[in-house]
Image (spheres, rainbow, N blue to C red):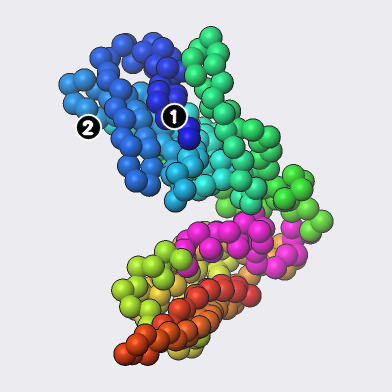
Amino acid sequence: MIRIKHFMTLVLIAFFCINTYCQPTILVTRDKKDYYEEYTALVSSQKIKHGSYLKLDKSMVGNHSLAIFGMYSYGKKDGYWETYYKGTNNIKDKGYYKNDKKDSVWTIFYFQGVVRKFKQVQSEEGVQLQIIDANPIISRTGNYLDDKAVGIWEFFDVHSELLQQYNYDTESLVYFKDHDLKNIETGFIGGEDLLNRFLYETFNPYGIIDSIHSTINLKTSKMVFKFTIDERGRIKDIINTENTIRNKKIYYRAIKTIMSLDKQFYPKKVDGVSQKSEKTITFDLKVDSNTHHYSTSNEISWLTNKKFNMYIILN
């Protein structure tokens, strides 16, 4: 089993001391059931993180995986940060914060199903964590200012080829591989792969199912919505045209997911003129039930297990 102690603090404490006039800090560690974290905090108030921060997720069998690494300044994110896809040791994104807001260059990576391992490496700077055989694939990269995407962002496909360039200042697509920008259909900024990932993470199907106290009444069913994407890529006129799920939590999560698509599309263009377009999104809940029976000397019982899958289709 990996011994979790002082992983990153030694690496960063000298750096942070220079940049914060050597504020007195103390190392804090928290070893919980689902995660481990360590960070430096002010001696005067140990609730205020000030310096390096590291969080590791724990699996059911006790393995550890990287979750978050970054820097705090007086309780606010400030400096370089990395986050990782849960349980995989594959980097999800990296970039800089300033006064608790995303700032400067950020790079986001595609999800990879391969679970990688990390090792501790001793250097002159201290103990560092190193991912073995890391091979991250960039999904998109660009600049943030005051927590908002600005300037031209670049989007890549899973083969690392440039797919799109989008200017967030002018809210316009400036490059689209193998497409005529004057005549294009409405599309998600960044492409279909990014859209599917966005819908999955925003709706969070497993999270919403787990939050429902009783799933006994959930059956295979679906919700269908229609909405308009206007000439600026804004979401308008959401209409629920079909709903057989009849669960308020799922319904409101679906509405929230649709609203999160606002400003995420570039509009349809015909001869260079932006046009409105209509879209349909379907939330299709599939429920498979398996019933098993067992008997004892004086009773017979039945146990029903349900498997839930949510499919989100936008067309």
Callout 1, which amino acid?
Answer: Arg
Badge 2 density bin: few <14, some 14–19, many ≥20, Cα 10 Å: few
Q: Position of residue 263 (x, y in %)?
A: 52, 59
User: Which residue is depicted at the point 66% across and 59% down?
Assistant: 193
User: Which residue is depicted at the point 42% across and 17% down?
Assistant: 10
Q: Is residue 40 above or below residue 115?
A: above
In the image: residue 178, left or right of residue 98? right
Badge 1 density bin: few <14, some 14–19, many ≥20, Cα 10 Å: few
Q: Is residue 11 above or below residue 96?
A: above
Q: Tell me the SS state at disc 1.
A: loop
User: Which residue is depicted at the point 41% across and 12% down?
Assistant: 14
Comparing 220 with 109, the one in front is: 220
Identify residue for label 1: 3
Identify residue for label 2: 47
Nearer to us: label 1 or label 2? 1
Callout 2, which amino acid?
Answer: Lys
Q: Position of residue 62 (x, y in %)?
A: 45, 44
Q: Position of residue 115 (x, y in %)?
A: 61, 46
195 is within the stretch colored magenta: yes
Magenta region: which residues? 180-205
Going from N to C along the chain, the mark reached first, 1 or 2, is 1
In the current view of this chain or complex, which residue is farthest to the left?
44
272 is within the stretch colored magenta: no
Q: Toward which corner of the image does residue 217 lie, by quadrant? A: bottom left
Q: Is residue 298 visible?
A: yes
In the current view of this chain or complex, which residue is farthest to the right?
178
Quadrant where the C terminus sits is bottom right
In the current view of this chain or complex, which residue is farthest to the front?
297
